[in-house]
Image (cartoon, rainbow, N blue to C red):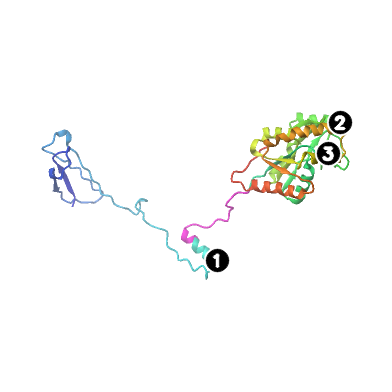
Amino acid sequence: MLRRLFCTSLAHSNLHHCHLLPIPYQSLHNSFTLTNAILCQTCPASRIQNIIETPRFSSSNSPMGDTRRPLSVPIPAVDKADRSELLRALEASLGSSFSSDPICPNPNPLIIVISGPSGVGKDAVIKKLRESREGLHFVVTATSRAKRPGEVDGKDYYFVSKEEFLSMAERNELLEYALVYGDYKGIPKQQIREYMTKGYDIVLRVDIQGAETLRKILGNSAVFVFLVAESEMTMVERLIDRKTETAEALLVRIATAREEVKHVKNFDYVVVNAKGKLESAVKLVESIIDAEKAKVRQRSAVI
């Protein structure tokens, strides 16, 4: 039974001043609305209120009124059921099938910039790295200097004349280039683009000056690894043992190397290539690559 609340005063909410009057139950054919006004004889006309009550009915066609739940599917005993049978039961119970897509996408191809002073063994580390790890592409640098004994054109460097090199720079074919010890060195863009498209990680070997330029170009999208010898003495001994410079050129390289060591703070990682421990240095570089591949926020370089 619905009742109308008749209040004699709106200023004081007191049951002693209220009367409950019975209202006949009317037909609820479609919707039921009470629109009768509350008439208060003892209150001013401005304080007369209307009470409209609309009963709510749940409908099977209304999403708010739909109380249906996923059908309960019996799940067989785990220790007795066949795997495929158990999978089907679990999917049916959850209301969706299990996806075979990778939970995490494949990691982005990396650009690894390896640099360091002269005499720290950059070439030896990179050579061993290429032998021990698949999916790496070592970008062959273009240079205007003459070949050293044992070097192979297209493998160690692309040996070009100064005129050819400058033409490449004018055509914007180089990611970066610099004049180093009187000779030009630069990184061809096309190699990087081609192999990154195939999913390869890119390894760049540059001097300190080149690394600084690449940091400005690539920012934090590349991984910068600083390679050092275990001591200054070892570094100088390696330069002497190469027997590729005159005494004057050797002095210049040593003085330059002393300054270049100070740039380690601008790199992401430092790797010590100690004498007789090449394998350890290479493994550390591989660990750096693996750690970068496992990052949630991947580096993404665009050339």
- Which of the two residues, 101 or 133, is positioned nearer the viewer here? 133
- Which of the two residues, 196 or 58, is positioned nearer the viewer here? 196
Specify which label sits upstream in the sequence, 1 or 2.
1
Label 3: few (<14), some (14–19) or many (≥20) C-alpha neighbours in 10 Å: some
SS at badge 2: helix
Query: What residue is pinned by disc 3?
Result: 239
Specify which label sits upstream in the sequence, 3 or 1.
1
Three-letter code, disc 3:
Leu
SS at badge 3: helix
Residue 103 location in percent, x, y? 57, 52
Extreme residue in the bottom direction: 80
Quarter of the image where one finds residue 238: top right
- Range of the magenta residues? 91-106
Query: What residue is pinned by disc 2?
Result: 248
In the displayed structure, would residue 60 be above or below residue 17?
A: below
Whether residues under marks 3 and 1 lie with C-beta atoms below 8 angstroms apart, the answer is no
Q: Is residue 16 visible?
A: yes
Left or right: where does residue 5 sit relative to residue 124?
left
Residue 187 location in percent, x, y? 75, 36
